[in-house]
Image (tube, rainbow, N blue to C red):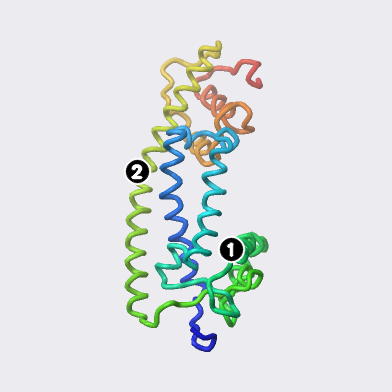
């Protein structure tokens, strides 16, 4: 396709392609993380998860995206919207180094509040800053608009189903993981001589519980994690915390 015949893909379609890619990556990485860490993945901090978490969450997606760009000139999200990444001058698929530079350029595009991505909306060739740095453009691969719309709406339906199931099943899983972790923590501190009120249920102090889930804090080294949660429960039980737990 010559440069005069190119149809450049705009901001909103490329944003949806990124959503599709994110969901695909999560569908691959989350089962691996749960297979390695079990439900502890939901309650442990990133530091406690270790290098395996960093490898699966950051390194694997980066390599997968770069390989897709070099091999197919497109990620799954780009394929859904019938788009390809090509060299801006020749129209050929990007080289490996272009793909690598383009991925690094993502971080440059993100730095000023994502302004480098927003640039796509008004650029003549719909290039983000990462495209300009790597010398690439994103073009449409078909001249059949009905096919593009069909694939787009099918992808919207599939993503909506996946997100709905994730919210339904994930909420229950997080709740069970938190209650299990709380029970273990309370038993550990009780065995160490830390006294609790009688009949205190594991789901006490839900406001602190939600804070812990959001921040994924787990143990004493967290500034407002386990210690803060235990103190809140002790206040509710009219029991004073021991001095070794910060008074």
The disc label shown at residue 169, or none: 2
Q: Position of residue 177 (x, y in %)?
A: 42, 32
Q: Position of residue 114 (x, y in %)?
A: 61, 64
- In the displayed structure, would residue 111 be above or below residue 121? above
- Give the residue at x 56% y 69%: 94
> Where 181 sits versus 125, above or below?
above
Residue 105 pos. (x, y %): 64, 63
Q: Is residue 168 left or right of residue 97?
A: left
Instruction: For label 1, count other residues whose C-alpha is less than 10 Å away and answer few (under 14), some (14-19) or many (20+).
Output: some
State which quadrant residue 172 falls in: top left
Distance from disc 1 to disc 2, alpha carbons, whole Å, reads 39 Å
Q: In the depicted view, which residue is nearer to us: 83 or 174?
A: 83
Image quarter of the C terminus: top right
> Looking at the image, which is closer to me, 34 or 169?
34
Q: Are marks 1 and 2 in contact (CB under 8 Å)?
A: no
Residue placed under numbered mark 1 in the picture = 96
Q: Residue at x 54, y 59 (%)?
A: 66
Left or right: 121, with 112 as reference point: left
In this rendering, which labeled residue sits more in front, label 1 or label 2? 1
Q: Residue 202: which quarter of the image?
A: top left
Residue at 43% over, 55% down: 23
Disc 2 on helix, strand or loop? helix
Task: Compare residues 95 and 194 and report the one nearer the observer.
Answer: 95
Name the residue: 48% across, 83% down. 1
* Category of crowding for the residue at label 2, using alpha-carbon neighbours closer than 10 angstroms: few (below 14), some (14–19), many (at least 20): few
Compared to residue 183, the image places residue 27 above or below, namely below
Q: Secondary structure at mark 1?
A: helix
Most extreme residue toward the bottom, as rendered?
4
């Amino acid at each position: 396709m010559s440069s005069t015949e190119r149809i450049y893909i705009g901001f909103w379609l490329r944003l949806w392609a990124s959503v599709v890619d994110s969901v695909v990556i999560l569908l691959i990485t989350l089962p691996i993380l749960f297979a390695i860490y079990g439900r502890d993945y939901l309650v442990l901090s990133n530091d406690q998860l270790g290098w395996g978490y960093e490898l699966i969450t950051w390194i694997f997606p980066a390599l997968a995206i770069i390989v897709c760009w070099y091999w197919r000139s497109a990620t799954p999200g780009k394929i859904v919207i019938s788009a390809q990444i090509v060299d801006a001058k020749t129209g050929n698929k990007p080289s490996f180094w272009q793909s690598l530079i383009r991925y690094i350029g993502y971080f440059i595009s993100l730095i000023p509040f994502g302004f480098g991505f927003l640039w796509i909306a008004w650029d003549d060739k719909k290039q983000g800053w990462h495209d300009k740095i790597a010398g690439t453009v994103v073009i449409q691969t078909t001249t059949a608009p009905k096919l593009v719309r069909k694939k787009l709406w099918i992808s919207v339906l599939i993503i909506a189903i996946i997100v709905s199931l994730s919210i339904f099943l994930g909420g229950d899983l997080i709740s069970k993981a938190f209650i299990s972790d709380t029970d273990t923590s309370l038993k550990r501190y009780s065995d160490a001589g830390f006294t609790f009120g009688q009949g205190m249920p594991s789901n006490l102090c839900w406001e602190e519980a939600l804070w812990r889930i959001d921040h994924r804090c787990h143990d004493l080294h967290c500034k407002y994690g386990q210690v803060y949660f235990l103190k809140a429960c002790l206040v509710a039980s009219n029991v004073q915390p021991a001095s070794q737990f910060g008074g």
